[in-house]
Image (cartoon, rainbow, N blue to C red):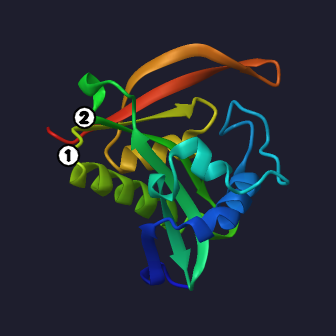
Amino acid sequence: MSIADLLVRPARAADDAALLEIDHGTWSPEASPGTRPDRERDPVFFREQHGGPEGFLVAELDGVVVGYVALHPAGDLATHAHVRIIDGLGVLPASRGRGVGEALVRGAVERARAEGAAKVTLRVLGTNPTARRLYERCGFGVEGVLVGEFVIDGSPVDDVWMALHLDR
């Protein structure tokens, strides 16, 4: 499979099972402060937690969903309507290192821009330098660090806030 064959598209309800598999297969304590996703939960989780399939873009290689990115408004206030947040990104291990994650992040940024957003934010754990480098390649910069915000496996872990300003 070539990255030229990569398709980034809006998610569909039928993608839920694939998204659940990606979420479960990519979880690690270096990437998430939460608990491992339950493989047995109903795939409708994605629709309930993120406002429906329209809150996701997926990456397909040869018709197989290999990654996703979740993007939605950062809050409910009218004064915050110009901000979108990426609050989930997953790429199957076999497809990593091939530009899938970068294509998903860039797709999310373009969607945010098309929606009239001026800023895209995200959070990444200090224990995940690979993800941080990906976001930096896509133009994101650190806006703040909540030092020791989480305790994972008995150790304090920083919560790094990053953003990309679309109006600059």
The residue positioned 61% from the left and 70% from the top of the image is 14
Residue 124 horizontal side relative to residue 19, left or right: left
Does residue 92 appear anywhere in the picture?
A: no
The residue located at (64%, 60%) in the rendering is 19
Mark 2 and 1 residues: CB-CB less than 8 Å, in contact?
yes
Residue name at image x 56 percent, y 14 percent:
147
Tag 1's secondary structure? loop
Whether residue 45 is visible: yes
Q: What element does badge 2 sit on? A: loop
Q: In which quarter of the image is the C terminus?
A: top left
Q: What residue do we see at 76% from left, 54% from top?
A: 42
Q: Nearer the viewer, residue 23 or 164?
A: 23
Camera-side residue of 167 and 111: 111
Horizontal and vertical percent position of residue 130: 56, 46
Relative vertical location of residue 1 with respect to residue 43 in this rendering, above or below? below
Residue 65 shows which numbered tag?
none
**Depth order, front residue of 7/79:** 79
- Residue 140 percent location from the top left of the image: 35, 40
Q: Mark 2 or 1 closer to N-term?
A: 2
Tag 2 residue: 82
* Label 1 Cα neighbours within 10 Å, binned few <14 / some 14-19 / many ≥20: some
Which residue carries the number 1 mark? 116
Tell me the CA gap for discs 2 and 1: 7 Å
Counting from the top left corner in percent of width and height, residue 146 is at 52, 15
Bin the neighbour count of mark 2 within 10 Å (Cα to Cα): few under 14, some 14-19, many 20 and up.
Answer: some
Q: In which quarter of the image is residue 37?
A: top right
**Amino acid at pointer 2:** His
Residue 8 percent coordinates (x, y): 43, 70
Judged left or right of residue 85, residue 65 is right
Along the viewing direction, whichever of 145 and 34 lies nearer the viewer: 34
